[in-house]
Amino acid sequence: GENVEQHPSTLSVQEGDSAVIKCTYSDSASNYFPWYKQELGKRPQLIIDIRSNVGEKKDQRIAVTLNKTAKHFSLHITETQPEDSAVYFCAGGGTSYGKLTFGQGTILTVHP
Amino acid sequence: GAGVSQSPSNKVTEKGKDVELRCDPISGHTALYWYRQSLGQGLEFLIYFQGNSAPDKSGLPSDRFSAERTGGSVSTLTIQRTQQEDSAVYLCASSLDSRADYEQYFGPGTRLTVT
């Protein structure tokens, strides 16, 4: 089955800096890669996703890139703000139905 | 509209007891997923429902875990003879359809503590 590895496990940045979180996946048939943000004590919420037919997707300050050949994808957050502080999870799936395999999560802390 | 809801929000139980966790998906969502989130870990897939059927139960950790869904809506996850390693947050998610690229909406979770 699919295996998703996520790095780093923790990331600390200053407000205004950029943050990058990387994930690798094992199943070359996976074709859907969402990113979820989970604030402390809250439920995970989808922030951006990418399908395997595109290499990059951007939504305001966040962007995701996908390299199918290398089987890795990354989340980029620019101009970070304290409210970006949360746990971010990548996931891979789409081989059959909506089953997602999640990475271990990255705790992002943005210092004012 | 109302999002995914779960109950109870917290459950403390003694080792060996059975527990039932409930999930109310968004109305009209045909696909429903259960995940488990242990402290500091990612989300671990448990089981998936399309309507009332569970085509994939591969993530259930043991035969002490079972789940059902009735009326294409409410789902119950049952853990029998709970063990301490069952302590985790159990999250439910629903999506409009089982297609992989349909957004999954998560509930707030049930925090289970087995003492």
Image (cartoon, coloured by chain):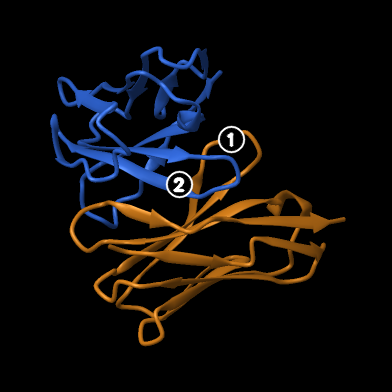
Chain colours: A orange, B blue
Q: Is residue B61 left or right of residue A35?
A: left
- Give the camera-side residue of A71 and B82: B82
Q: Is residue B82 above or below residue A38?
A: above
For residue B80, which quarter of the picture? top left
Q: Is residue A62 above or below residue B57?
A: below
The residue sitting at 29% across, 44% down in the picture is B59
Identify the residue under disc 2. Answer: B43
Q: Nearer the viewer, residue B101 or A70?
A: A70
Where residue A31 sits in the image (x, y, percent)?
Answer: 29, 69
Spot occupied by residue B31 in the image (x, y as percentages of width and height) = 23, 39
In this rendering, the answer to whether A34 lies above or below B19 is below
Asked whether residue A78 is in view, the answer is yes
Most foreground residue, A43 or B21: B21
**A4, above or below B74, in the image:** below
Tag 1: amino acid: Lys
Is residue B95 in view from this perspective? no
